Amino acid sequence: MATGTTDTDAGPAGGTLETRGIEPVPLAERHGRPGELFWVWFAANISILGLPLGATLVASGLTVWQAVIAAVLGAVGSFAIVGAISIAGRRGGAPGLTLSRAVFGARGNIGPTLVSLISRLGWETVNTTTAAFALLSLVTIVTGTSPAAKDHPVITIACIAVFVLCTVLVAGLGHGFLVAVQRWATWVFGALNILVGGFLVATVNWTAVASATPAPIGAVVAAVGLIAAGTGIGWANASADMSRYQAPSVRAGSLVLSAAAGAGIPLVLLISLGSLLAAGDPALAEAGDPVAAIRDMLPVWMAIPYLVAAFGGLLLSNHLSVYSAGLTTLTLGVKLPRVYAVVLDVLVTFVGAIYFMLVADGFYTPFIAFISALAIPITAWVGVFVVDMLRRRYYDPDALIDTSPTGRYWYRGGIEPRATTAWAVAIVAGYLFATVGPASTPWFTGPLAGTWFGENGLAWVITFVVAAGGYALLGGAREPR
């Protein structure tokens, strides 16, 4: 049975409510162009969170120039993978995790889909919390009161609600409205980021930047892995969600370029700026609240546009994430119209943000460590899916939404054994090389975490190789009869 209604649809250029759920988009309604996706990915990555990521690289021992190289390789390279996976969306016209049913089976796909949803909701909670802190800081600057959230519980909840409502407005209306908003809002918040960034560059300690000692090549390799796992890899299974409206005539190379350039440009600039700032002030990398740490570096008159830019950048990222999470929720089998699935997802993040801001004490860092650890099962999915995509040219649109035992993608008991086995084995292999949890007090250290691959943060690379290689060796991507 189909999930979601199909009476009308907004399409890429539409401005009305998108009522399509996870059903494949008919060929006659696919008119999208790669330029639209460029702006979608650009907007989703102008979040201020790129600054502390750059600061972390310098705190780990890299010079600014090494951090820039790592940013180019990690961000652009990982989003090239995102662009490559979006080719499947153009082929099948369905969301990424829905297309994944053809690879893992109707039941076998539940595991990858659930991991993706948990990761998406986790990062949305981080976005919501950080943006609410930014809005709260803006309010307290205007009112001249304490910026502590627990001193203003009502205002804090109101700040969270504003962010959530702005997210629902765009993500709820759907693909066409989201594409339009992402494009035009990029110019507004991008300009604010340039203004603030220019001011921050003037505060850089260039003497400290020039005198820094280069780190070993292994540290640079680890930095590339950190950036890739924290940026593109996390978006990989959402790429087809946006490309499903692309015209069949769109070239694969254009899709790859739109994602790599669209996300790579803002990420490289923000990560580079963060590394410049941290070279003169290492404390930035240790800040529990990166938004507040950078705000304190600015005079009040510049802090206001900075906080507006921070709020806007996080909002643009959240639009895309929540839209994707809604589709992922439907893929799990939740019987709701798409817009209601979006509302359900943001209610979860609303409650999570309230907990972080008003109840929890020091839980923010371990929570980010937890959802970062989910990069390994997501990477395992990427490895299997990419190999399958290289050999599969067709997705049966009716079978994608037929999860009954008579469906084409039911396979054996609802599970495609080769794909599911490769995915599971790759996850185990990845965690053997991984350290899970905060760096100071890890929860789990894999028996091979002390090897060169483990010490340099390349557990996700091991995961990808095992997943892709294992699936290929098992003879995956054989179409069922």
Image (tube, grey):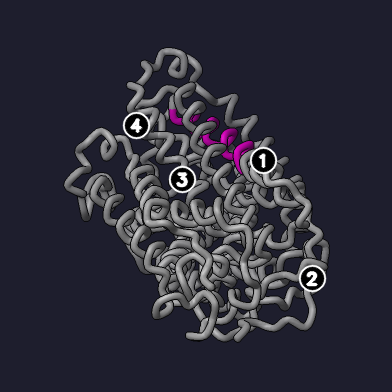
Name the chief secondary structure element in magenta.
helix
Q: Earlier in the sequence, mark 1 or mark 2?
A: 2
Q: Is residue 101 visible?
A: yes
Calculate the distance from the C-alpha at mark 4 to the C-alpha at mark 3: 17 Å
Determine which residue is flagged by label 2: 10
Q: Earlier in the sequence, mark 3 or mark 2?
A: 2
User: What residue is shown with label 4?
Assistant: 60
Dot 4: within a 10 Å radius of its alpha carbon, few (fewer than 14), some, or many (20 or more) residues? Answer: some
* Type of amino acid at the residue the image marks with label 3: Pro
The mark nearer the N terminus, 2 or 4, is 2
Q: Secondary structure at mark 2?
A: loop
Q: Nearer the viewer, mark 3 or mark 2?
A: 2
Query: What residue is pinned by disc 1?
Result: 257
Does residue 304 appear left or right of residue 271 in this picture? right
Q: Residues within 10 Å of mark 3 (few under 14, many from 20)?
A: some
Gap in angstroms between the C-alphas marked 3 and 2: 38 Å
Q: Secondary structure at mark 3?
A: helix
Residue range corresponding to the magenta coloring: 263-278
Which comes before the other along the chain, label 1 or label 3?
A: 1
The answer to whether residue 144 shows anywhere in this view is no
Left or right side of 36 for 95: left
Residue 268 among those drawn in magenta: yes
